[in-house]
Image: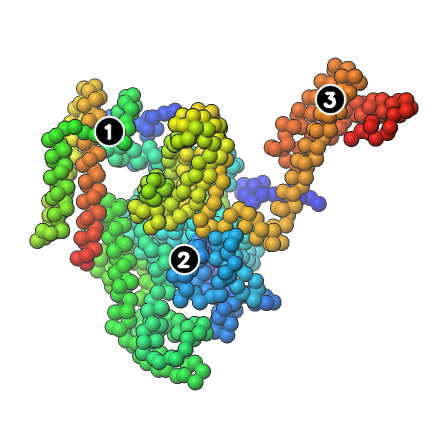
């Protein structure tokens, strides 16, 4: 097996070689992939010529279907056909109760171990991460088929307003799909890149992004190829889905359906979406529902529709107002308003956004594709294909990070709209004599009470030296990286001991769960084997060190000269120092060296034991272990 | 690849004269220039060690930029550079006139929603606060440059108070605008 000859993605490639990369927009309703070819970014179509892949996965007993094939199963097999799964990313068992009527799935009740909701399907229980991984795999395959080679890496877009848990879930899905993620990119920032606004004019722009299930508003300052996000806001569970839902409710209030089931609910949502889309170009939409012996026909006017969704659109305008305030700019300074996301096709949205900003919103590029195209441009640069590119994207943290203090209050550590990456440190002390551990609860959100914020993780710091109360100085550093993901480092400063951190993600998958999923995936078998081989070699190395030690302790001085003894000790120490850090092969070499150095010693011991046997001793007393 | 010298202070980092008055354009341009060299996007294919270093450097640039961009933070950073220990928790002001002014401003703020034109009242207070912030900034510069650090520290504390009221005002303005829309 030539395991060690497999190059890591991103390494050992010739410098002039064009490295394949792609941008993926993992959407609530639709997903798509784009790539840069001959200097031009384009969305890629499947073999049927379709660019948009419906974000729907069907888990049947025999096979898993993604996209249009899965969509076809939606009415016939609604419980095994999962859509709008993005709404569950990074969400906990508690959250799904609120989404129950939007996502009528059969959730598993067996959540004793995991905090991640699992959905029962004919193809087994799945989490949102696994469903998203299927969509990502399908898009990556499309890109690789189209480009004729392996992707060196991808940029995956996420709503700017996604919190840490939602971002982490997206990263986990990519890991599960076997993709190398260059970066998670915020959707509005991606759209700004796609418009290439930096080349035309420096100044302030607003990106209004209303998708199927999420809403973002970002205020950016453009300056010579640098996209600097000043503020971002939004709602990670507000979108076109909710408009469909409002229409479906309206139909229900008009028609008199005696009973409700998953299939009828699905049909209502589909009819609602069609009506919404129809109203973009027309004043009245005819609606017809046929279900069993029930038949309902009706008309929805544009005015009625506007009324149904007015509150929802106003909510987005309020978020725009806040983002402008947070950015510390004046509305009149904004030179361009860019519209992104399929739901911006709704006339009322365009109207109210235009009215609020006092200028006609820009929607020259296909609002469904613009995010993926921006991501593709970024991916091409990150892959290293444009060494002279000056483009730089500077983003912000969408929601404040805080920790729980006495009385269940949240103390802000890093406030929202702080430029990322960012690191903040905090010092704590112990309140009991001999205390060696400490618990920290990290939350995300703007509210005062921890219970109103989103719980991200509980950290348990362990292993700092026992001291008298108040004398330990534990420095905890919160680091948010360029993906908007948080990590924590803790150190006891007076002793310099780095504390062990045990992370309990409140909603995400634990490392153990991800590992289990990975093991189930054949694509990653080789990583597992490599890791296991290293573990085995480490065990072997420890065994050799122990054997040498016990042998030397019993007869080392008796059988060896000072020089021989020193040589063996040196080889033994060399091996021991490498156990934790060396690669599998290096360890093998170090073990061999110890064995070679102690060859004569082993021979001498053999002779000695033979002698002892001849003297009438029992063989098991002198057996060389 | 290390670009930054971690022992430099924030002013040195951005190649600025240390002092309360900063060249904002230069600060902004130099910040973007440094980020262009250090940002993690430039090290996507680098070794783990270089990635970590890039993360640390980009974080430092952001922290330094944020500190120097805000008058309140800048003032306090200058005092720290001059060896003054600042502790937000225990510091209070005992200037009675200033405390009275605080009280008055807060009362006015609380009363804004009840005024005939709440937004106009907010704007009035906004103007007042801006004027006060500028006054305090001038006082800070005067004392700081004269080496009167203890006095400068007391003024920086007042600057912080005013800043906090400004934040509360902005929150109120947002709420009022939202209600009126």
Which quarter of the figure is the N terminus of chain A placed in? top right
State the separation of the CA atoms marked 3 and 1. 63 Å
Q: Quadrant of residue B82?
A: top left
The circle on residue A553 is: 3
State the separation of the CA atoms marked 2 and 3. 62 Å
Left or right: residue A436 versus residue A336 is right
The chain to which mark 3 is attached is A
Q: Secondary structure at mark 3?
A: helix
| Residue A576 seen in the figure | yes
Please name the residue that numbered disc 2 is placed on: A95
* Residue A196: % across, % down: 36, 51
Structural crowding at the residue carrying mark 1, measured as other residues with C-alpha within 10 Å and reported as few (<14), some (14–19) or many (≥20): few
Q: Secondary structure at mark 2?
A: helix
Left or right: residue B121 versus residue A520 is left
Mark 2 vs mark 3: tell me if same chain: yes
* B73 vs A230, nearest the viewer: B73
* B150 vs A339, nearest the viewer: B150
* A3 vs A14, nearest the viewer: A3
Please name the residue that numbered disc 1 is placed on: B91
Which quarter of the figure is the C terminus of chain A placed in? top right
């Amino acid at each position: 097996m030539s395991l060690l000859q497999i190059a890591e993605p991103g390494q050992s490639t010739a410098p002039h070689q064009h490295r394949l990369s792609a941008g993926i927009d993992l959407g609530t309703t639709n997903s798509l992939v784009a790539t840069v070819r001959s200097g031009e970014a384009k969305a890629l179509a499947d073999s049927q010529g379709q660019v948009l892949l419906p974000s729907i996965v069907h888990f049947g007993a025999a096979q898993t279907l993604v996209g249009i094939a899965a969509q076809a199963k939606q009415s016939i097999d609604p419980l095994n056909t999962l859509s709008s799964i993005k709404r569950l990313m990074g969400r906990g068992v508690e959250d799904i109760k609120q989404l129950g009527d939007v996502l009528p799935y059969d959730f598993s009740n067996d959540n004793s171990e995991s905090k991640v909701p699992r959905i029962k399907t004919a193809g087994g229980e799945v989490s949102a991460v696994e469903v998203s991984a299927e969509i990502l795999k399908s898009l990556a395959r499309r890109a690789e088929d189209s480009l004729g080679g392996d992707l060196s890496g991808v940029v995956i877009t996420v709503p700017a307003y996604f919190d840490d848990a939602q971002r982490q879930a997206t990263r986990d899905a990519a890991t599960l799909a076997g993709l190398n993620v260059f970066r998670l990119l915020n959707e509005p920032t991606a759209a700004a890149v796609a418009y290439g606004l930096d080349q035309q004019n420096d100044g302030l722009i607003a990106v209004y992004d209303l998708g199927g299930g999420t809403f973002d508003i970002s205020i950016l300052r453009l300056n010579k190829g640098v996209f600097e996000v000043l503020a971002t806001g939004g709602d990670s569970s507000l979108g076109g889905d909710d408009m469909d839902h409002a229409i479906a409710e309206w139909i229900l209030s008009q028609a008199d359906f005696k009973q409700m089931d998953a299939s009828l609910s699905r049909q209502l949502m589909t009819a609602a979406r069609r009506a919404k889309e129809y109203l973009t170009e027309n004043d009245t939409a005819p609606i017809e529902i046929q279900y069993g012996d029930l038949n309902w026909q009706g008309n929805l006017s544009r005015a009625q529709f506007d009324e149904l969704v007015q509150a929802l659109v106003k909510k987005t305008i309020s978020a725009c107002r806040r983002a402008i305030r947070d950015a510390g700019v004046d509305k009149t300074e904004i030179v361009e308003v860019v519209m992104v996301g399929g739901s911006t096709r709704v006339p009322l949205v365009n109207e109210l956004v235009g009215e609020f900003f006092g200028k006609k919103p820009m929607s020259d590029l296909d609002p469904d594709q613009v995010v993926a195209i921006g991501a593709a441009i970024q991916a091409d640069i990150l892959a290293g294909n444009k060494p002279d590119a000056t483009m730089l994207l500077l983003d912000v943290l969408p929601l404040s990070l805080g920790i729980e203090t006495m009385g269940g209050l949240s103390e802000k550590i890093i406030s929202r709209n702080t430029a990322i990456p960012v690191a903040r440190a905090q010092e704590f002390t112990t309140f009991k004599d001999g205390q060696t551990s400490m618990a920290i609860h990290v939350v995300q959100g703007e509210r005062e009470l921890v219970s109103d914020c989103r719980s991200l993780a509980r950290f348990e710091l362990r292993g700092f030296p026992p001291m008298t109360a108040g004398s330990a100085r534990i420095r905890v550093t919160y680091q948010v990286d360029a993906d908007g993901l948080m990590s924590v480092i803790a150190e006891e400063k007076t002793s310099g001991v780095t504390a062990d951190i045990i992370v309990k993600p409140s909603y995400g998958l634990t490392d153990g769960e991800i590992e289990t999923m990975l093991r189930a995936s054949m694509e990653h078998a080789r990583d597992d084997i490599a890791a296991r081989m290293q573990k085995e070699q480490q065990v072997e190395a420890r065994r050799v060190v122990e054997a040498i030690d016990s042998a030397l302790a019993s007869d080392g001085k008796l059988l060896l000269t000072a020089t021989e003894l020193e040589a063996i000790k040196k080889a033994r120490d060399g091996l021991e120092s490498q156990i934790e850090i060396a690669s599998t092969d290096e360890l093998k070499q170090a073990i061999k060296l110890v064995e070679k150095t102690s060859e004569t010693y082993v021979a001498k011991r053999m002779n000695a034991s033979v002698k002892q046997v001849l003297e009438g001793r029992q063989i098991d007393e002198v057996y060389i272990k | 690849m290390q670009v930054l010298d971690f022992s430099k202070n924030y002013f040195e980092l951005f190649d600025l004269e240390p002092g309360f008055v900063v060249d904002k354009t230069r600060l902004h341009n130099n910040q973007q220039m440094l980020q262009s060299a250090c940002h993690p996007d430039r090290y996507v294919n680098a070794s783990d060690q270089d990635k970590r270093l890039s993360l640390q450097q980009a974080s430092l640039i952001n922290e330094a930029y944020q500190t120097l961009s805000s008058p309140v933070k800048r003032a306090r950073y200058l005092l720290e550079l001059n060896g003054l220990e600042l502790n937000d928790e225990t510091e209070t002001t005992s200037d009675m006139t200033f405390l009275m002014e605080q009280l008055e401003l807060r009362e006015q703020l609380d009363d804004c929603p009840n005024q005939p034109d709440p937004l106009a009242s907010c704007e009035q207070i906004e103007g007042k606060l801006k004027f006060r912030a500028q006054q305090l900034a001038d006082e800070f510069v005067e004392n700081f440059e004269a080496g009167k650090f203890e006095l400068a520290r007391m003024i920086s504390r007042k600057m912080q108070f005013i800043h906090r009221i400004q934040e509360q005002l902005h929150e109120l303005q947002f709420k009022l605008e939202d209600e009126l829309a």
